[in-house]
Image (cartoon, coloured by chain):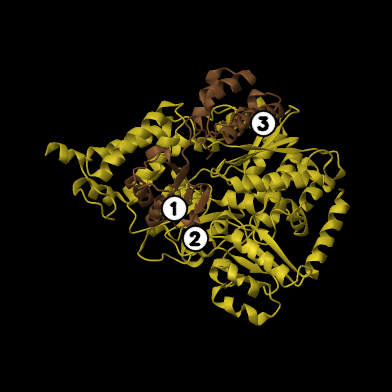
Chain colours: A yellow, B brown
Amino acid sequence: MTFEELCGKQTEEVERQQALKNRIMCCTAAGCLSCGADGLRQAISAEIAAQGRQADVELCGSGCMGMCSRGPLVLSAACNRLYGNVAPADAAALVSADPAATETLADRAIDLDSPFFSKQTRIVLANSGHVDPEKLADYIAAGGYQSLGKALTAMSPRDVVEEVKKSGLRGRGGAGYPTGLKWELVMKQIPQVKYVVCNADEGDPGAFMDRSVLEGDPHRVLEGMAIAGFAVGAQQGFIYVRGEYGLAIQRLQTAIKQAEREHLLGARILDSGFQFRIDLRVGAGAFVCGEETALIASIEGKRGEPRQRPPYPPESGLWGAPTLINNVETFANIPPIVQNGGDWFASVGTASSKGTKVFALAGKIVNTGLIEVPMGTTLRTILFDIGGGIPEGKFKAAQTGGPSGGCIPEQFLDTPVDYESLVTIGSIMGSGGLIVMDDKSCMVDVARFFMEFCMDESCGKCIPCRAGTVQMHDILHRMTRGDATEDDIEMLETLSGLLRETSLCGLGQTAPNPVMSTLKYFRDEYEAHIRERRCPAGLCQMESQLEEAMA
Amino acid sequence: MTASPPAATVKDNREKLLERAMSRYQYSGDALIEVLHTAQELYGFLPPALLKTIAHKLRLPASRVLGVASFYHFFSLQPKAAHTFVVCLGTACYVAGALGLVEALDRSGAKPGSSGAKNDVSVQTARCIGACGLAPALIYDGVVHARATPQLIKAELERIGVK
């Protein structure tokens, strides 16, 4: 397919869709699937056939629509209404041409003008919920692969890198390294063989942004990677995806096959001289593989253990070749940047953090689900306007950054969310998991939970992390049991510093963060556990083994 | 999920399928993880003899193959039980009371990481399955259950005859 043919195909598909009376989008992301979206889809499909409306009503699957707590979700394009908690029995009303028939669904309609939607800005998730992830034509109709076409026909690799630099896009995997600089580093490397790797090993508990992007808009990520390959001079890409994400793997496989068939990937892309292949590598359940050097080792078929940096992957990565590693969300930002220009992207967000960020809202919050907000939005807006607040009880803390992040207490709710501000209050942006805790959550127990996670996931290569996480978990466990002493807090602080300074990779260096931030903001809870042997949240059992032994 | 069936005809077929997977990667040692994925899919788990065969075919030291197989949580060196419960212990599920689910399974004699009575039930915990909007999540025999409760577990256990 040439670029002209691609544009022709887009017009054709848009016209076809406009000629339809209705398009019913049924959310088929993992969240809705586990509330019965599959059965619902079959029921609607059967209903379309029963009413004999195959010609003018189309049923499509779609990516995550955001409001996972109200699943399964269905969007009726004709009246632009979104319905939640839809049951197979509602199929007839959805398909019917009579507007009065949807009255039975009126009470389950979700207001698309509510703050949940109006306060979001969707760049990465623009297609999610509107495009069928299993249909290439749908993605093309939404302007898909136009950016790749633009890059290949009207831009040089240097132009693309400059545009990405101008956009101010920073790595969405958590650390926030400027993406344009990384691309430039790889582009400038002399070796002929280079690789592009997409890090889809989303391991933070409480984070499901990457999974939703891969499930909802896989072609977007492929397009972003192909543009990256063109810019840095690579001909081979790998997507390293978690083994747990079965649906994402399946959708990616389908998408790669579709794109190869239409010459949007593979040899002679869009009839140009550029070739780029993408292969999937499925992870096998190791959190540490999210670290780039460990991820590289895992793609090479080895134990996923990190190694010393430098050399950094842009110099020496996969099989010793220069390697560009970016996160799923970073690649998903690339096509709109190339299409609309770096300046457009830089107009969203704050001075140092540009664009938007996708967050996975979970925990004690009314609207759990997937959201995307401009950088610099305050936590209060995210949690109370978009998230709908706390269902019962009182807000206590918001946890960002997973086991590498920290707990943000109430007094910082008005902090704008960007890379720097979150670091100053003792947390990190992380990959985008945002978990809300109310007064029934014990902060010492939360710290223990994350330390247990790090202890289990430590690869064991360096001693500070291997032994330190065990020691810290031991102390925290003693605290939740009511066996700790005053010295233990000091010991925790010493160990925290040690792990931070001496661990080999990010896992160990950031493992103390949850402890440090809870110690800083919720020290009284730690002290209550130690001095009064009491859990203020009433969660810890306090079954002291020490006292039993003494008695 | 599948226990190894005794029928010899099935076994032959599996060997052939594994061979095909290895040849697809040109017997390259770099593809070890992909090959182990296929092997586990075919056999349900990775017995020592199978690991040795893979090491031989990919021309890798047996220690490297065992090293990789034991490093990743996904690979199981022990046969799996007929029914599997996976309790998600991700942060969102933890906050929503996933420990109550583990306790419910515990009471029935099935502990995380172990196989219960008569090898009927194995209980595993997962580090976030990404269904945080539906916390607490439980995967029972491959199906995700949203907002799982101890009552649901009790009912399921009774249904399969574990008391």
Q: Residue furthest left?
A: A551
Q: Which of marks 1 and 3 is in front?
A: 3
Mark pair 1, 3: CA separation: 39 Å
Q: Name the residue under label 3.
A: B17
Q: Which chain carries label 2?
A: A
- On the picture, is A131 further left or further right than A509? right
Residue visible at 63% across and 30% down in the picture: B9
Q: Which chain carries label 3?
A: B
The reply to the same-chain question for discs 2 and 1 is: no
Q: Nearer the viewer, mark 3 or mark 2?
A: 3
- Asked if A108 appears above or below A549 in the picture, the reply is below
Element on which disc 3 rests:
helix
Residue A93 location in percent, x, y? 64, 75
- For the C terminus of chain A, the quadrant is top left
- Whether residue B141 is visible to the viewer of this picture, yes or no, is yes
Disc 2 crowd, CA 10 A, few/some/many (<14, 14-19, 20+): many
Residue A111 location in percent, x, y? 57, 73
Which of the 4 image quarters holds residue A106? bottom right
Which of the 4 image quarters holds residue A480? top left
Residue visible at 58% across and 29% down in the picture: A297
Element on which disc 1 rests:
helix
Q: Name the residue under label 2.
A: A368
Element on which disc 2 rests:
loop
Q: Mark 1 points at which residue?
A: B92
The reply to whether callout 2 and callout 1 are in contact (CB within 8 Å) is yes
The reply to the same-chain question for discs 1 and 3 is: yes
- Whether residue A65 is visible to the viewer of this picture, yes or no, is no
- Asked if B57 appears above or below B42 in the picture, the reply is above
Q: Which amino acid does label 3 sit on?
A: Leu
Q: What residue type is labelled 2?
A: Thr
Mark pair 2, 1: CA separation: 10 Å
Q: Which of A411 and B47 is in front in this view?
A: B47
